[in-house]
Amino acid sequence: MTHLNRRSFTLAGLAGMGLTAACGNGIGSNGAQEIDARVDNTLDYLYSNYPNAADLAEKSVGVLVMPVVTEAGFGFGGGYGRGALRVNDTTVDYYSATKGSFGLQIGAQQYAHVLFFMTEGALSEFRRSSGWAAGADLKYVVSDEGGMLKADTTTVLAPVIAVIFGQAGLHVGATLEGVKYSRIIP
């Protein structure tokens, strides 16, 4: 009988993270310039394909853009990506997004996501934290069949709104629950 202890769980999780790191998500890149270029391209894509997202951006006090997050899992899983926080269309900080998981899973996927900070309080809490974790209280905006972003009244009043898009791969579903964001120096 196999006994799974904390050490083997940690080692397997790190191996899973190493697997996702090899998937072309910006690790070992030219730093800030490359992240900023990817953020620009991601926002251009988002606003041209989902014009309602531009309205969210205008109402927000800050926008965290993660151009590529790669997730992979086979029992143990992980995900990683890098992006930038913009306030008034200017990059103010760079962040990584990491995620670890354990359970019945197999596959890999890549996707982009953007967090719109709708209140000064939510933005300052994010920036002050040493590692902000996205939780179940994060409100999601989803695209309908017509390519429009739909948000209900409770979503519009939320302090942080997430948009996930550009999904590719064979891993079921994309959620930001359990993703931890940490400030980085690219």
Image: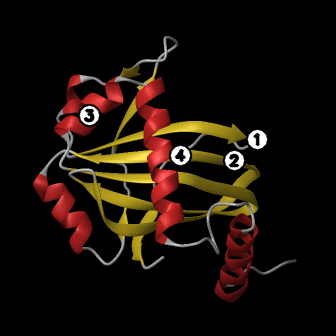
If the image is split into quadrants, where does the N terminus sit?
bottom right
Q: Which mark is residue 112?
A: 4
> Where residue 43 sits in the image (x, y, percent)?
43, 41
What is the spatial separation of the Cα atoms under label 4 and label 2, in whole angstroms?
A: 10 Å
Which amino acid, mark 1? Answer: Leu
Residue contact at pointers 3 and 4, CB within 8 angstroms:
no
Name the residue located 36 percent from the left edge and 74 percent from the top edge. 131
The three-letter amino acid code for the residue at tag 3 is Leu
Residue labelled with disc 1: 170
Could you say which disc has been placed on residue 109 in the image?
A: 2
- The secondary element bearing badge 4 is classed as strand
Could you tell which of marks 1 and 4 lies nearer the N-terminus? Answer: 4
The single residue placed furthest to the right in the displayed view is 1
Which kind of residue does numbered mark 2 sit on?
A: Gln
Q: Residues within 10 Å of mark 1 (few under 14, many from 20)?
A: few
**Could you tell me how far apart the alpha carbons at marks 3 and 4 are, in whole angstroms?**
17 Å
**Mark 3–mark 2 distance (CA, rounded to whole Å):** 26 Å
Q: Sequence-wise, which precedes: disc 1 or disc 3?
A: 3
Seen from the viewer's position, the closer of residues 125 and 52 is 52
Q: CA distance from mark 1 to mark 3?
A: 30 Å
108 lies left or right of 155: right
Residue 129 spot, x, y in % from top left: 26, 74
* Numbered disc 1: secondary structure: loop
Q: Residues within 10 Å of mark 3 (few under 14, many from 20)?
A: some
* Label 3 sits on residue: 56
Q: Nearer the viewer, residue 100 or 32?
A: 32
Position of 80 with respect to 94 (left or right) is right
Q: For the view shown, which residue lies furthest in the top direction?
A: 146
Q: Are marks 2 and 1 in contact (CB under 8 Å)?
A: yes
Observer-nearest of 26 and 159 = 26
